[in-house]
Amino acid sequence: MNVATELESPQTRSATGRMKALVYHGPGKRAWEEKPRPVIQAATDAIVRITTSTICGTDLHILKGDLPGVMPGRILGHEGVGVVMAVGTAVTAVRPGDRVIISCVTACGKCDYCRKAMYSHCRDGGWILGNTIDGTQAEQVRIPHADMSLHHVPADGDEEALVMLSDILPTGFECGVLNGQVKPGDTVAIVGAGPIGLAVLLTAQFYSPAAVLMIDLDDNRLRVAQGFGATTLINSADHKAIERVLELTGGEGVDVAVEAVGTPATFDICQSILAPGGHLANVGVHGKPVELHVEKLWDRNITLTTRLVDTVTTPMLLKVVGAGRLQPNKLVTHRFALDEVMKAYDTFGNAAKEGALKVILKNQPSA
Amino acid sequence: MNVATELESPQTRSATGRMKALVYHGPGKRAWEEKPRPVIQAATDAIVRITTSTICGTDLHILKGDLPGVMPGRILGHEGVGVVMAVGTAVTAVRPGDRVIISCVTACGKCDYCRKAMYSHCRDGGWILGNTIDGTQAEQVRIPHADMSLHHVPADGDEEALVMLSDILPTGFECGVLNGQVKPGDTVAIVGAGPIGLAVLLTAQFYSPAAVLMIDLDDNRLRVAQGFGATTLINSADHKAIERVLELTGGEGVDVAVEAVGTPATFDICQSILAPGGHLANVGVHGKPVELHVEKLWDRNITLTTRLVDTVTTPMLLKVVGAGRLQPNKLVTHRFALDEVMKAYDTFGNAAKEGALKVILKNQPSA
Amino acid sequence: MNVATELESPQTRSATGRMKALVYHGPGKRAWEEKPRPVIQAATDAIVRITTSTICGTDLHILKGDLPGVMPGRILGHEGVGVVMAVGTAVTAVRPGDRVIISCVTACGKCDYCRKAMYSHCRDGGWILGNTIDGTQAEQVRIPHADMSLHHVPADGDEEALVMLSDILPTGFECGVLNGQVKPGDTVAIVGAGPIGLAVLLTAQFYSPAAVLMIDLDDNRLRVAQGFGATTLINSADHKAIERVLELTGGEGVDVAVEAVGTPATFDICQSILAPGGHLANVGVHGKPVELHVEKLWDRNITLTTRLVDTVTTPMLLKVVGAGRLQPNKLVTHRFALDEVMKAYDTFGNAAKEGALKVILKNQPSA
Amino acid sequence: MNVATELESPQTRSATGRMKALVYHGPGKRAWEEKPRPVIQAATDAIVRITTSTICGTDLHILKGDLPGVMPGRILGHEGVGVVMAVGTAVTAVRPGDRVIISCVTACGKCDYCRKAMYSHCRDGGWILGNTIDGTQAEQVRIPHADMSLHHVPADGDEEALVMLSDILPTGFECGVLNGQVKPGDTVAIVGAGPIGLAVLLTAQFYSPAAVLMIDLDDNRLRVAQGFGATTLINSADHKAIERVLELTGGEGVDVAVEAVGTPATFDICQSILAPGGHLANVGVHGKPVELHVEKLWDRNITLTTRLVDTVTTPMLLKVVGAGRLQPNKLVTHRFALDEVMKAYDTFGNAAKEGALKVILKNQPSA
């Protein structure tokens, strides 16, 4: 095979041509089972052996059947850190043996969207891992457009921290903080204190807001948010979150409201607490339309944004983590061996009860 | 009276202390009647004798009873050009005798919103003329915060052109073009070819878009839009505007969609034709909520904005008009004497039938 | 006197119509002497009794004769916190008795430059205090355009901290950090670890740079910088600062270089350490031209900025201080009674020897 | 040869393995001579048969010996339109037979600079054509990173117009207009009415400036500028350009000054005519340092930029040309057959005398 440079000889590979992976078998069905090892299909591909992976809320959505585009038989997962095993002939930025972070978004780097730094809409990529192609909850994974879609792990990098750069931190930062245009001195409200809301909370602090109000139904999550830097906690179970925020802001509302849940109710809180000139940054994945009160908002000079993470800020996040200004491993609450992934899903699926944020899947350097 | 400098002596003024004005008397009722002349009330006020005024779609909304905050007895109108008659002691930028354009938005220049160039939300101003204080469809009008809210008419300025800078052109430009972030080479769709949509069309061309698609139900208006620079006309009467735009853009959608009507149906066209990364700039005044399809848009990287005109761009628009790069008088279709304002309302109220865009009200230099 | 509202009766005032002030008498000459108390001259004026003031490097420049526009007889000082004693009739934002921070820059809020948030170039203001009109190193001071040029001290505000918002912090932030466009993850070099360089250092951290390199000739100052958050210290006495920075950045150079001294030598360090795409933000006051190496820089995509502080960010800085994210009193090294100002100048004039950063002048609540 | 897809059979190619090209032989020496045809060297390469090329002012600089990095034997030229003959295996965006515009800047699309849209500083590209690798004044040329560095010619594209998108138009637009931040209503001065200054002039009009002042020593060039849209012409031969600009702007200066020559004298005009808050965009290639008057500019809030063209705006320029809003062929004054390139250089080298702007080199569809 002359289109790839490999870490192992082809013989070795073919001798061990099977691997274990977490496979989706339709709504509600998943299994840890044997699958063929991935191979280089294009000159721009890399094969990565997963050393650390994790589970995303989106994986649960797939299992609920919310994303009918994901076909049975698909290996799930779009987050991971690992070691490059083989690269196609056109790959120049990574070599076999390199330790890398896998971006949840694949980018060709050349199409019109990639040139505009909108990798999420890449003509030959976007979010495809664990969606339209096999993903990272497996011993190995094929990564298309490897030069753009992998990032080197720094010399002393902590894999558990860095796997948070696959998806959750760039998502919180790009969709919530950058789109929300958080500025020093701002009052920011984040609706939803799950992992993604907490990622927004952590990265919002890059810009020194004066106040960060965290709104959620779960007191445990709110307590975690406090430890992560939230300045005010609001439990919205009493349906009074809107009044509470307006009261706290002297009737003005907030500069930035970040929707980090994905429901009409949480969206409504966001649109109801915006100060004139405020920004509503939607991060949550929505399954149905919302009612937008343009009859109240038309003259309020507001800006509402949506975004699928582009992962364009991963190099910058790597610098901030390297400088010790961000501790992503704060998000890690549970650890499992990769082959315990079925159990890990059970834990993550009961996040509230288990107190779970991100669960780490660790792949032993197998024999 | 020592708090003001006046053009006429107080004697003259008190001798002629009455004037004619268009007065709102509750839904459906208006009259051209006598009212007391306005007087300086604060050190920052000016009194302006109207020489040219016009009628806005919002005035029709008031007459329909859509803005219950407007009280019977109110003089309508928030657009005008005139001559300064008197100024309060703290006014420094204009003097009696100066010819001025009146901004529809009053700005103190000092509050937190004014400092952020959001005059529309001025703590002691905003849109108040012909709304919460008496307006410009009268022989004279009191303008609070005159230094910020009046602009000098250039030496050779055409009043009919310049009265378009009171409201409609900054509205189209700020709410539609600036908020829509129109760029050279963009494909822009404007939904609504009424006066405000045409103001968007005229000012969008400051940024050299490659294509401007105009969407309306009225072929006459579309023809006007063509004369104003629209590159494609789409009559949406067949409910196929969305398909048509997608077809014309190779399935991609537009970079910028401007909502210049204010109904759920037109808003829906806008949200359905956005390319990934696109901007939806709302200009229309809405009376009810709209359904926002976040279930489709959450991952499309779109930006939606609302805005009440701030009139911060009036000085810039004056330069562009002065340079001959914008001909605002294109918008003028009818002319009336100010004391024919009742008839002018009839014409403007039947805009489609009358082929009316903006109707000019001309006040004769009275005896 | 009917153009002003006063805290004391006119009688009281005229009875005590003299005050003490620090007066400039030409190069090298200053005196603490009696002067007439300031009075309201315009409807937009306020009189402020100084409770806390401080000395700026620019005051030393004036004393050296570097600013020939400053006339003998001028009361120096453009920084201060105090209590409003009287206001002109057009002043609405502050009342007698209010505790206020005085901005070093006076802004009318209405001219073309003020509308563009360039208060430094206000047509009827700019930096005039202690320059073309009497300043704040006095028992009382007249503040023109009081509504725009004074900011309320928050309820629990610490005056020593807040007097840093008169000039040094907005200067460091606006001219250094905002103009330098510091971003999360950036490598920033600050040349000059004097008070202004330290103000840049403190406020640069609002944006979470990955590294802040501090360059100075004085090891004591560098040690202070380390305590303030600098990540690397470079003593440039050996003329090897440029090589050192390039070495530390792998030959790339820095994202942002801030010139905080005002000499050709320090400017040259800045222009020599910029990465392609880098920003050079000049903060220092220069007395002579510099050689700009366009023959090397023309193709480096660099941005060089100059700026006189506009103090437009003071409201925001107040929020950040209020939130505890900035401790301006770190800059205070010495305290004097206001009537010891002559001694305070001696100390500040020997900053290096005395280890002085900012010296506080405290005015006792006089009998 | 299995790493490339070719238009002709290898047999055909080897049978005609020579071509003609304009070769640099050291300062002052050039020849139209035989060279080996280029071949695919990397999987990302393309071979393009030139159909239209042109000469750049930079080519003259090379011939003067100003760029000692260019080695004798080098084929000159970095502008061209042509037909793809062969592509490497990793090329996906262009196919043999495609008509393409060649960007003067080569971009890998994957390095840190390319990800920031700074193609000019690409780690494996930048301006290399006709500089460190063979260029476009030849029958054929090898283009590295073809997917990023070639742009499709639209169906009805005029090659003479489109070859202006190789370099001169993106250079004028990116380095002059975008970096200068030209806005509607601005007063813009362009110093230098040569081809590059005229490219700035043409593209500045995308943003509807109120006035464009053109400054040059040559009345003929100024006349051309007038035809291209300049509103004021200033011949600077009398050394009074600065006074003239200040006079014309009421002493204020201009919003944007574009340096399009590359000498200390022209740079000095630019820095002397900036209004407070103004932008100085340097486009000219400088051979020596300039004196920057920071002692006057430190408090003027100015922004000075340098830039090597990134060609990131080529897709946008293609849209604007396609929409008929820009006529690049206005810049063409002379036409030669490619094999008359020696004569074309003579003409272009005597631009003033010959009235030459851009000279077209046309390659006949050879037998």
Image: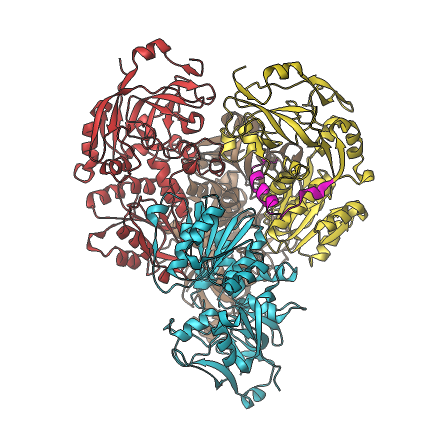
Chain colours: A cyan, B red, C yellow, D brown
In x, y percent, where is residue D101?
A: 45, 57
D51 and C70: which is toward the camera: C70
Quarter holding residue D74? bottom right
In x, y percent, where is residue B308?
A: 37, 40
C60 and A240: which is toward the camera: A240
As for residue C322 lying within the magenta part, the answer is: yes
In this rendering, the count of numbered labels is 0
As for residue A8 lying within the magenta part, the answer is: no
Whether residue C194 sits left or right of residue D172 in the image: it is: right
Q: Which residues are magenta?
A: C309-332
In x, y percent, where is residue C19?
A: 70, 20
A151 and C267: which is toward the camera: A151
| Residue farthest to the left, as pictured | B353
In x, y percent, where is residue B327?
A: 33, 34
Q: Which residue is found at the position 23% from the left and 35% from the top?
A: B63
D20 and C157: which is toward the camera: C157
Does any portion of residue D274 appear in the rendered image? Answer: no
Does any portion of residue A112 appear in the rendered image? Answer: yes
Q: Which quarter of the rendering shows the N terminus of chain B?
A: top left
Q: Which residue is found at the position 50% from the left and 71% from the top?
A: A353
| Location of residue A128 with respect to C352 vertically, above or below | below
| Location of residue A308 with respect to C316 vertically, above or below | below
